[in-house]
Amino acid sequence: MCSCWFRLAFLDTPCDIPNIVEGSQVSGTSKELEIILTNVARASLEELLTDYRDFLRNRGLTEWTKDHLYVQHLRDLNRTPGANYETFRKGIEHIDPAICANVIIGLIKVTNFLLDRQIKALENAFVEQGGLREAMTRARLAYKPKDKKRTQGMMSSSLTATESTPSAARSSASGQHASCASTS
């Protein structure tokens, strides 16, 4: 019974996995966008958590407290190296809707905790390193001194070349000729 509701809840709720994946893919270019997409995923999970709490409340079921025996068992399972869906299958697909919903609530809480840590780390990295605009400015400023020297070298060599061309000599000669003509 609960596993069907679980599937419907995930189909009806915006999926946060693509937001996390997209955020990670853009991390090399935009820390801001990575933070935004991770926050969207976090907000989506918070909405799902509210839905599961409503599910329990509407059926007169209670949410487990942090001292509940099953919560302790869930914490132990969360520490299992390489934990995956199979690790939690018994609880997620349990016939008792209270167990099913509470296990999912516990998993959402753990995921939210981990996302909160990731968001904090991303924000710290943004403050320390800046975003894409800052990185581009640093790269441009690092390039500019080299660019100025090269440009100045090109300008001085082009001025020297212009002065020694026959057309420059002609225009300076015609300029002198014109001045001579006006005096005579």
Image (tube, rainbow, N blue to C red):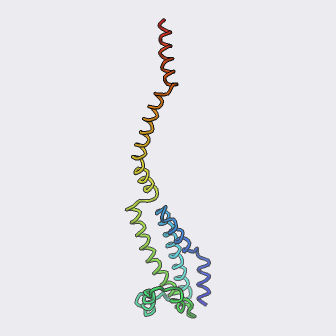
Judging depth in this view, the residue of 11 and 176 nearest the camera is 176
Residue at the image point whose x is 59% and y is 79% from the top: 10
Extreme-top residue of the structure: 184
Q: Is residue 125 above or below residue 83?
A: above
Q: Is residue 146 above or below residue 43?
A: above
Rendering coords of residue 104 (x, y %): 52, 85
**Residue 2 in view here:** yes
Residue at the image point whose x is 40% and y is 69% from the top: 121
Rendering coords of residue 114 (x, y %): 44, 77
Q: Is residue 139 above or below residue 112?
A: above
Residue at the image point whose x is 52% and y is 82% from the top: 53
Rendering coords of residue 3 (x, y %): 59, 88
Judging depth in this view, the residue of 27 and 2 nearest the camera is 27
Quadrant (top left/top right/bottom left/bottom right) for the N terminus: bottom right
**Residue 60 in view here:** no
Q: Quadrant of residue 125?
A: bottom left
Q: Is residue 74 above or below residue 136?
A: below
Count of picture labels: 0
Extreme-left residue of the structure: 128
Rendering coords of residue 14 (x, y %): 58, 73
